[in-house]
Amino acid sequence: MLMQTPPRMVADGPADISARIERLPVTRRVFWTRNIIGAATFFDGYTVIAIAYAMPVLVREWGLNPEQTGMILSMGYLGQLIGAVFFGWLAERIGRLSVLLFTILLFVSMDIACLFAWGAASMMAFRFIQGIGTGGEVPVASAYINEYIGSKGRGRFFLLYEVMFLFGLVGAGLIARALVPVYGWQAMFLVGLVPAAILIPLRFFMKESPRWLASKGRYAEADRIVSDLERSAIAQGHVLAEPKPVAVKAVEKSGIRELFSGIYRRRTLTIWSMWFCSYLVANGMIAWLPTLYRQTFNLPLETALLYGLLTSVAGVVASIACALLIDKVGRKRWYTFAFLTAPLPLLALAWMGATSPTEVLVLAGLAYAIVQTITFSLYLYSAELYPTRLRAIGTGLGSAWLRLGSSAGPILVGTIMGAAGIQYVFAAFAGILVVGALVTMFFAIETKGRVLEELSP
């Protein structure tokens, strides 16, 4: 009688590197690597929204019609969709750091191109290419930073980096109010050149992900990087425990199909649903509220922009709270609570008819802030759901659904407003969030405090 051979498990290169990273504190190199990438991510967020603040001037200067304006704004999101998938795939093959630096240089170079745009068509083309870079930067950076950190405190460490994207969104509004009236729309793109000046000289400070190197059989390179981190920790007075390797399954061949097989099928479909539901509501509201204040409630432009800025700030405050607490609360519990709580103020608005700008500011702002804790932290959760061989492409494909949700949100708003009225928009948003809550409750897994290799063999 033939005995079936069990799956071969190895505890050599990848397992050793993972175990040694798990026992490390946050060393100076890891701390500053996160901050350097965080600076790039700040300007990624800045770049995504900068065109919105340039458009009021461009519409008059170039005589743009509404269709051209919409296309310019949409081209960046289309590019982001392509960039998230392509660069996620590429990062699995040639490494996190090379791809990360290329995406940053790509969106910065398109900032230069946008300075010399001469009309709608050229701006559409430059924004599309720029979107490819911005769409690829965050998912690859998410994989890169997650792979440097052990399970203890991973959520807090990573999300304090991720909040830089939100600061970039808020910063763009503050910079626009200060510079555009004085220096024109080009000022928004000039400021976007800063990350190149920061990152090019600091390129040599950063090292490739040791987990990725080990997964590709480049153990000697991974060992050198981790050994440097160990020496740094010891020099800072830390006593390192003995590493405890987690067995890593040997995989002959891996590819995009693995995302839809075994344990990863359920994870992939779940995270896609969470991305889509949360971003459809969050970006649908934040993109639409200033226009609602201006056109429906006839508020002065300055007041409408201020209300929009206050909503963004509320999102940042809530996200910082999430970053500090999510390691204690847990991912699944936090997301379920947020998906179930955010619909309450939206349903209140629908019931009251959304007849006052103050009602909308308070209740829609509260709902947005709660949903923002989901949207900004899903990069953390996505990266935890996949093994090193799939982490960048899995996160990239997942984040592609945020682009689809972001595009669908404003379309949904316009359709429902035209057919029914404002209050039904908020009711629809509440229903979408309830769907997200049900998916999370029944299909999401908890990742708090667990080693990446243990979560995803």
Image (tube, rainbow, N blue to C red):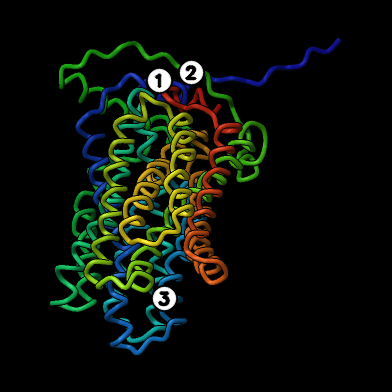
Question: Where is 317 relative to 354, above or below?
Answer: above
Looking at the image, tell me whether mark 3 or mark 1 is earlier in sequence order.
1
Question: Where is 300 relative to 326, above or below?
Answer: below
Residue 391 on image: x %, y %: 49, 40
Which disc is residue 246 wearing?
2
Q: Dividing the image into 4 quarters, which one contains the C terminus?
A: top right
**Tag 3 secondary structure:** helix
What is the distance, in whole Å, between disc 3 and disc 1 at their CAs? 48 Å
Query: Mark 3 is on which residue type?
Result: Ile
Which residue is located at x 37 percent, y 31 percent? 222
Which disc is residue 103 wearing?
none
Q: Quadrant of residue 334?
A: top left
- Residue under pointer 1: 19
What residue occupies the far bottom of the structure in this picture? 63
Question: Along the horizontal axis of the image, is 171 left or right of 398?
Answer: left
Which disc is residue 72 wearing?
3
C-beta proximity under 8 Å, tags 2 and 1:
yes
**Tag 1 secondary structure:** helix
> Which tag is nearer the camera, tag 2 or tag 3?
3
Query: Mark 2 is on which residue type?
Result: Val
